[in-house]
Structures are given as C-alpha cells and as structure tokens.
Amino acid sequence: MLPQRCGLCSEQCDHVLCIGCATLSRYEIFTTCLSKINAATVNFREMKEACTELLPVIQHFAFDFNPLTEFDPIIHKQDRKAQQYIAYCEDMSDDPNDQKLFSDINSLGYTFIAIYVDGNGNCLYNAIWSLALMNNDFAIELRVRNTVEFFKKQNTRFRESCDNP
C-alpha cells in the first residue's frame, strides 16, 4: 500500500490526518480547511482540487445536527426589525384553491419569530447554528462542508442544468 498524504498539511502518513494534525481540535481542523479553501480562490479548478483534497478530512468527522424545537427568549435574541416582515410569510390569500404553505403551522398555534444573527458574511451558517444551539465553531464547519459538497457534486449539477435548460 502506498503511503498517503495528510489532508491538512500534506505530510506523508498512513491515515487521513498525520500525527500532528490529529492532535488539533475540531475547530482548528475546520478553520485550517477553510483557510485552504480561501487560499485556493484563484480559480475554479484550484477550488475544486482543494475541496477534493479536503473531502476525506471532513468525512472523518461525523456531522451532528440537532435543531431546537422551541424558541427560548433567554438564549435567542429576537430581531425586532425582521419581525415586521414575518407577516409576509403567512398565508394571506382567502382563495380556497391557493396552496397554503403555512396553514399546518398556524393551525397548531405556532408563531413565526425572527431571530437575530450576526451579519458577518456567515449569516446563513450563523442562523443554522443558532437554531441548533451549537457554538460558533459550527458555522465554520458548515461553511467548509457546504463548499466541499458543492465541488464534489459540481459535475452532476452542471450536467443536470445543461440537460434541463
């Protein structure tokens, strides 16, 4: 069996991560992955290569996501400005033939609540981790996983979009 290279530092080893990288915390590993992705933003080919190299690293870590089922005003900060737009997310049509997107939620007595997240360029990922009551490190992990998954399936997506214009 040929020796392989560490997915983070490219040192020769017999595993996905070398001895040195295996001692890093999950946060340090995903931050390093994000740095490698960011360094490869020169062109599409480099990004794909970086993501292909990182795929075994991220597959080495289980993806744990357990979303909250209830709003907790102690944990979540309500976004008062965004809350005014929630009315646009409700079924307003009186036409019985229109599909009701939120009728099951409204009939159960649930209310939509806008939760504040930092708008630092990671707002989608911050919104997801805040709903799972994870720490901020999870947003970095989500961003890395999303980018690597995009490039992993990019050929399939491209073919599908060309076949179905």
Image (cartoon, grey):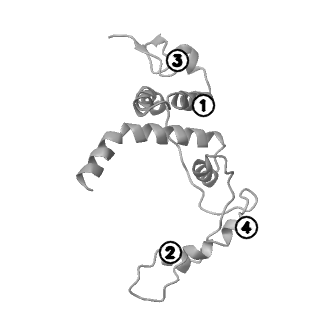
Residue annotated with mark 1: 31
Mark 1 and mark 2 lie on one chain; the one further toward the N terminus is: 1
Between the C-alphas of marks 1 and 2, the distance is 38 Å
Q: Could you tell whether 136 is left or right of 89 in the image? A: right
**Label whose residue precedes the other's in the sequence (3 or 1):** 3
Q: Residues within 10 Å of mark 1 (few under 14, many from 20)?
A: some
Q: Is residue 1 above or below residue 146?
A: above
Mark 4 neighbour density, 10 Å: few (under 14) some (14–19) many (20 or more): few
Q: Pick whichever of labels 2 and 4 is earlier in the sequence.
A: 4
Alpha carbon separation for disc pair 3 and 4: 45 Å
Distance between the alpha carbons at the discs numbered 2 and 4: 21 Å
The quadrant where residue 55 appears: top left
Q: Which mark is residue 80?
A: 4
Q: Which-is-in-front pick, marks 1 and 2?
A: 1
Q: Mark 3 and 4 residues: CB-CB less than 8 Å, in contact? A: no
Measure how far apart labels 2 and 3 are at the Cα level: 48 Å
User: Closer to the N terminus: mark 3 or mark 4?
Assistant: 3
Mark positioned earlier in the residue sequence (2 or 3): 3
Give the x, y percent position of residue 22. 55, 20
Residue that appears at 57% across and 51% down: 124
Is mark 4 in CB contact (under 8 Å) with mark 1? Answer: no
Residue sitting at x 67%, y 51%: 119
* Residue lying at 62% horizontally and 50% vertically, measured from the top left: 123
State whether residue 121 is above or below residue 3: below
Badge 3 marks a residue whose secondary structure is loop
| Label 2, residues with CA under 10 Å away: few <14, some 14-19, many ≥20 | some
Q: Amino acid at mark 2?
A: Phe
Q: What is the CA distance from the residue labelled 3 to the residue labelled 1?
A: 13 Å
Residue 93 seen in the current view: yes
- Relative side of 83 to 30, left or right: right
Disc 3: which residue:
9
Task: Give the amino acid type for the residue marked by disc 3 in the picture.
Answer: Cys
